[in-house]
Image (spheres, rainbow, N blue to C red):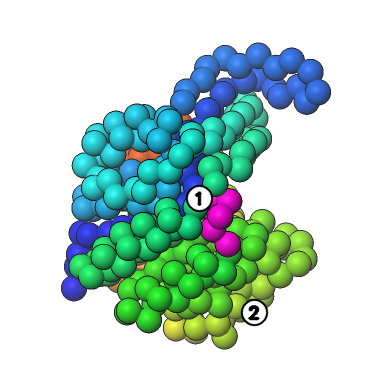
Amino acid sequence: MTTKKVVTVTLNPALDLTGKLGTLNVGSVSLVNKGSLHAAGKGVNVAKVLSDLGAEVTVTGFLGRDNQDIFCELFEEINAKDKFVRVNGATRINVKLVEESGEVSDINFPGVEVSEIEIKQFEQVLFELAEDHDYFVIAGSLPKGVSPQLCANWIQQLHDAGKKVLFDSSRDALTEGLNSHPWLIKPNDEELSGFVGRSLKTPEECQQAAEELADKGIDNIVVSMGSEGVLWLNQNQWLRSQPPKMTVVSTVGAGDTLVSGLCWGHMQGMEKNNLLRFATALSALAVSQVGVGVSSLEELESLQQQIQLTELS
């Protein structure tokens, strides 16, 4: 059964101020060659990619009233239904500095503080959407006022209602959320290292660490490893995909793009191998461009043919 309807949840969105520069001079002046400011946050990025792929997207979460215009414009542009709860203050600005070498330095600010009343408003929106949506992507960090336990409770309630929750977060939010039966998680190697408390340097070590999560009742455990590709555990079967070498322009949004591809592939009922090829190709294409979105379906098609798949024991 295929569907086009999906909800993306961004609890702590951000305006991304991205600057391109030769080299970052830490502790002194750095000159930016080119800059841009755009609406972002993990769930917002996922919404944009899913919309480009043909999904009917509803976006929700918490959005600061003071600087919401740029978000409203994006939601209109991608035909997303805007169900964000407006809160007092301004949505945070995150700074991303992209060096010529491809290195990205992220400076992430804390975001707005959410009140009890606003949380109740959000819960009402979320569970109303659950009446006629099956897929929910909850992605990104948590704002002040939303505890990891509260977020985990939402995931559990959606799971209990038979919904497929794709959960992509880190640190305490990830640790709590893992025990609430998300349907799919996608930590990168760094986030997985943080969770298991040791450094993971090889795909084999990532696979071993991910297997420690296998008894938590999570249907799909996906680990993104950058140029090393993607690991996917489903029904006790491991698949690994390896993209071709890409010219990296920016890695910003590549993980969100992978989540979008995994979500869309499942929504369209793709066969497993094709689904992983599609999602990996989409993510690989993302690093070759600035900004999030599907730039060329032809290029995506061609890239899918170049993805190598391996079944792992």
| The residue stretch that appears in magenta | 141-147
| Residue at 54% across, 58% down | 146
Spot occupied by residue 171 in the image (x, y as percentages of width and height): 65, 60
| Magenta-span inclusion, residue 144 | yes
Q: Is residue 250 visible?
A: no
34 versus 117 height, above or below: above
- State the mark number for residue 114: 1
Q: Of marks 2 and 1, which one's residue comes earlier in the chain?
A: 1
Label placed on residue 17: none
Q: Secondary structure at mark 2?
A: loop
Task: Estimate the x, y position of residue 118 in percent, counting from the top left.
Answer: 42, 53
Q: Relative to 6, is 15 above or below?
A: above
- Residue type beneath disc 1: Val
User: Which residue is identified by label 2?
Assistant: 212
Q: Position of residue 68 (x, y in %)?
A: 38, 33
Q: Secondary structure at mark 1?
A: loop
What's the amino acid at mark 2?
Glu
Residue 255 position (above or below residue 34): below
